[in-house]
Amino acid sequence: MPTLLAICGPMFSGKTTALIAHLAQHPGALAIKPAIDLRYAAAEIVSHTGQRIPAHAVSIAAEIEPLARDAAVIGIDEVHFFGRDLTPICRRLLLAGKSVVLAGLERDHLGEPFEPFPSLLCDADQVIKLNSPCAVCGRPAIHSQRMVQTPGRIVIGGAESYQPRCRECFQPAPAPRAP
Ligand SMILES: [Zn+2]
């Protein structure tokens, strides 16, 4: 049965690792990543901890359906880069009998819902919400604290740009203070 599995949580919570582990169970699964995210490799999805699988890098959500024609399982990383166009595409893939696995941020750097993930959470058959230890106090973190003063919702970066933070330690941009 086609299912939608949604994996979310803050930066450094293991979303990509969980996506890779799930896709590894389905030989022939199609892996998709945004072309904007070239932090580690253009033709692979790579987790912060070094796991990797081959992937197609696409610039806009509309490129996904033609690529997915022959795939039974489609995994999409960094869903927040694709915008609201992704939601109807995922619905069509499911109606076409395909299973979809999504990984991405459900909140932005201000702690607000970050579409398309909130809409896709409503559609999901199964949700895995991960957390990581707060960088300040070690309690479970649900937020991604931006550590650089950059406007806009999209900043590509790793440990120098973001920290996982719990509710108490989270300081919404634009003026984060280092602990
Ligand atoms: Zn904390």
Image: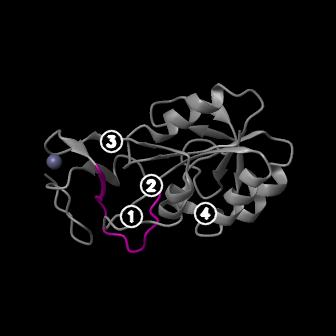
Give me the residue at 54% from left, 28% from top. Answer: 51
Q: Which residue is mark 1?
A: 108
Sequence order check, earlier mark of 3 and 4:
4
Query: Is 168 on the left or on the right of 72, as rendered?
Result: left
Looking at numbered disc 1 in the image, what kind of residue is underneath it?
Asp
Looking at numbered disc 4 in the image, what kind of residue is underneath it?
Phe
The boundaries of the magenta stretch are 142-156
Give the secondary structure at mark 1.
loop
Asked if the residue under mark 1 is in contact with the one under mark 2, i.e. CB atoms within 8 Å, the reply is yes
Q: Nearer the viewer, residue 119 or 157?
A: 119
The alpha-carbon separation of the residues under discs 4 and 2 comes to: 11 Å
Q: How is the image coloured?
A: one colour
Q: Quadrant of the N terminus?
A: top right
> Where in the figure is residue 79, as x and y percent of width and height?
56, 55
Q: Which residue is mark 2?
A: 105
Looking at numbered disc 2 in the image, what kind of residue is underneath it?
Leu
Q: Which residue is mark 4?
A: 82
